[in-house]
């Protein structure tokens, strides 16, 4: 990088979510889960100073999608499909795309073989004036950062 040239990190508030076969207006919050590979300690009798470390299974947490409730029932119907027929035929791929200030796609996370495990409709409050937010917890079989 040349002197005086600055590269700013991307901001976290410009993004979109693409869910295979479902048209969604937008989400107010998306949580991309961590990915952890288990550390397996192993000791051999001929290796006296200590233990060795091997890599184990890799697991990821759930994706959380939050949006204001609208007339759209697409996500809710997806959750009901899982409840009635199981996750087998309900699995979909999801992409979370980070957008820069010019509107160009900059980062992309592909969530593979995802399906909703939890739906929360939010809390009603007669004294409040907030938007009613619904939350979907999505489980999956892997996350890939493509870009």
Image (spheres, rainbow, N blue to C red):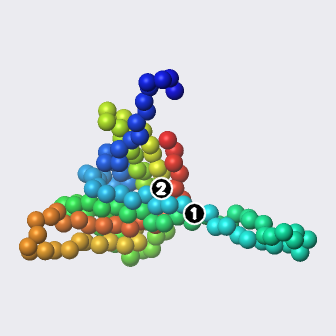
> Farthest right residue?
46
- Please say if 137 is above or below 104: below
Instruction: Assess disc 2: are there few (<14), some (14-19) or many (≥20) residues with their C-alpha within 10 Å of its C-alpha.
Output: many
Q: Report helix, strand or loop for mark 1.
A: strand
- Please say if 115 is above or below 146: below
**Looking at the image, can residue 81 be seen?**
no
Q: How many marks?
A: 2
Q: CA distance from mark 2 to mark 1?
A: 15 Å
Picture coordinates of residue 58, whole percent (x, y):
61, 64
What label does residue 73 carry, if any?
Answer: none
- The residue drawn where x is 71% and y is 70% is 40
Picture coordinates of residue 70, whole percent (x, y):
19, 61
Q: Which residue is mark 2?
A: 111
Q: Nearer the viewer, mark 2 or mark 1?
A: 1
**Looking at the image, can residue 96 be seen?**
yes
Q: Which residue is mark 1?
A: 36
| Contact? badges 2 and 1 (CB < 8 Å) | no
Q: Going from the N terminus, do you reach mark 2 or mark 1 first?
A: 1
- Please say if 19 is above or below 131: above
The quarter of the displayed image where residue 77 is located: bottom left
- Please say if 21 is above or below 36: above
**Residue situated in front as seen by the camera: 147 or 141:** 147
| In this rendering, position of residue 146 left or right of residue 101 | right
Picture coordinates of residue 33, whole percent (x, y):
46, 61
- The residue drawn where x is 10% and y is 65% is 129
| In this rendering, position of residue 91 left or right of residue 99 | right
Picture coordinates of residue 107, whole percent (x, y):
44, 43
Q: Report helix, strand or loop for mark 2.
A: strand
The quarter of the displayed image where residue 49 is located: bottom right
């Amino acid at each position: 990088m040349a002197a005086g040239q600055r590269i700013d990190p991307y901001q976290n508030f410009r993004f979109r979510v693409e869910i295979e076969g479902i048209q969604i207006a937008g989400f107010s919050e998306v949580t991309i889960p961590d990915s952890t590979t288990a550390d397996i300690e192993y000791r051999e009798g001929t290796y006296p100073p200590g233990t060795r470390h091997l890599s184990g299974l890799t697991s990821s947490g759930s994706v959380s999608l939050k949006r204001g409730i609208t007339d759209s029932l697409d996500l809710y119907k997806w959750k009901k499909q899982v409840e009635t027929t199981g996750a087998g035929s309900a699995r979909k791929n999801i992409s979370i795309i980070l957008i820069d200030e010019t509107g160009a796609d900059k980062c992309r996370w592909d969530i593979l073989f995802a399906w909703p495990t939890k739906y929360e409709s939010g809390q009603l409050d007669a004294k409040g004036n907030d938007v009613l937010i619904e939350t979907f917890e999505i489980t999956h079989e892997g996350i890939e950062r493509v870009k």
